[in-house]
Amino acid sequence: MNMKFIKKIPTAEEIIEQIPLPEHIKKIKQARDEQISNILENKDNRFILIIGPCSADNEDSVCEYIGKLAVVQEKVKEKILIIPRIYTNKPRTTGEGYKGMVHQPDPSKDPNLFEGIIAIRKLHIRALSEFHMPAADEMLYPENYTYLLDVLGYIAVGARSVENQQHRLTVSGVCTPVGMKNPTSGDITVMLNSIYAAQQGHHFIYNSWEIETSGNPLAHAILRGAVDSSGRNIPNYHYEDLIYAAYEYEKLQLANPTIIVDTNHANSMKRFYEQPRIAREVLTSRTYDPLLNKMIKGLMIESYLVEGRQEIGENIYGKSITDACLGWEKTEELIYKIAENV
């Protein structure tokens, strides 16, 4: 076996016992979780914004950003429910480079998975305790979910993971809302099959256990654009794309059909500054068709304190070290515009 065993990682139960979520915060989170579920179940007509840095690279800057979101949330609470992005696993197409806080709690130092697990749990708990908004994270590795299962308000399964059987089966046993992205190919059939699988119950092996799940009725779709065989980005947020996806989705008669539109990635051709324009177009499309108005329940936006991106080592506080993001001023303006148009 060509593997070097470095150290045994504590179980999720051991980490949660070591770094527990305070009891009074559990009650706050439960109330917020119910609000998110109510939107997906058409019991609340507010619009969801899943918004924040591409990758959570620094605890202080991420929490400062979420603090700003919390102030805006109070002002738009009648129209919008904000879910901050705290993405602690960063997928890399080639596997090279920075893989997120769970791998490198300090991006300038060598990977340390044990310290990374401690760091991501502390970050999520700090943000939740200070600002009372359960965050979104990506299920890049199904087994890592267990270290955060009591703190997350939303989970995304990415374009490169959505075809993976272990992700689909794991989501079927999760109580949290999970957005399943279309794959990089853009084939929405793959995404819809993933949602179908996640909403069913299954028997499978998970963390050395034979388990049985009952299905996750809150699994739903995220449209993030695609990439063609020549490497060119193909958006899928235009009206014709949304109509096609919505009607194909409806045919399956799944529970709580919901579409979240990712305004960055292949939809923006990674031009982060296009996100406000894309958001406006999606909101306009909702007004043209009753099914879109009902099914499109939110947007995913990449945003941070400072606009753009930087290389690791530049040390610009609050600026993304992965994909480029909107800066705070344009983000705040965009949130208010969205609130006026939903």
Image (cartoon, rainbow, N blue to C red):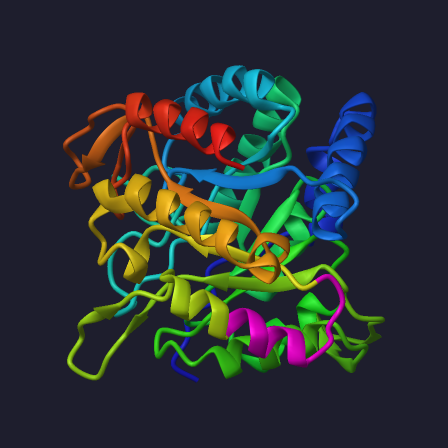
Q: Point out the image quarter for the C terminus.
A: top right
Q: Which x, y percent locates residue 160? A: 42, 72
Residue lying at 48% horizontally and 44% vertically, measured from the top left: 116
Residue beneath the point at 40% across and 43% down = 301
Magenta span contains residue 28: no
Measuring 42% from the left and 54% from the top, which residue is drawn there? Answer: 262
What residue is rendered at 42% in x and 23% in y?
65
How far from the left and from the top, in percent, is residue 117?
54, 45
Q: Is residue 267 shown to the viewer in this render? A: yes
Q: Is residue 180 left or right of residue 63?
A: right
| Region rendered in magenta | 245-256
Q: Nearer the viewer, residue 182 or 245?
A: 245
Residue 143 appears at what percent x and percent y?
62, 63
| 146 or 328: nearer the viewer | 328
Q: Position of residue 87 (x, y in %)?
A: 46, 45
In this rendering, the answer to whether 310 lies above or below 259 is above
Query: In this rendering, is residue 43 above or below 123?
Result: below
The image quadrant where one finds the N terminus is bottom left
Q: On the image, which quarter does residue 156 sit in?
A: bottom right
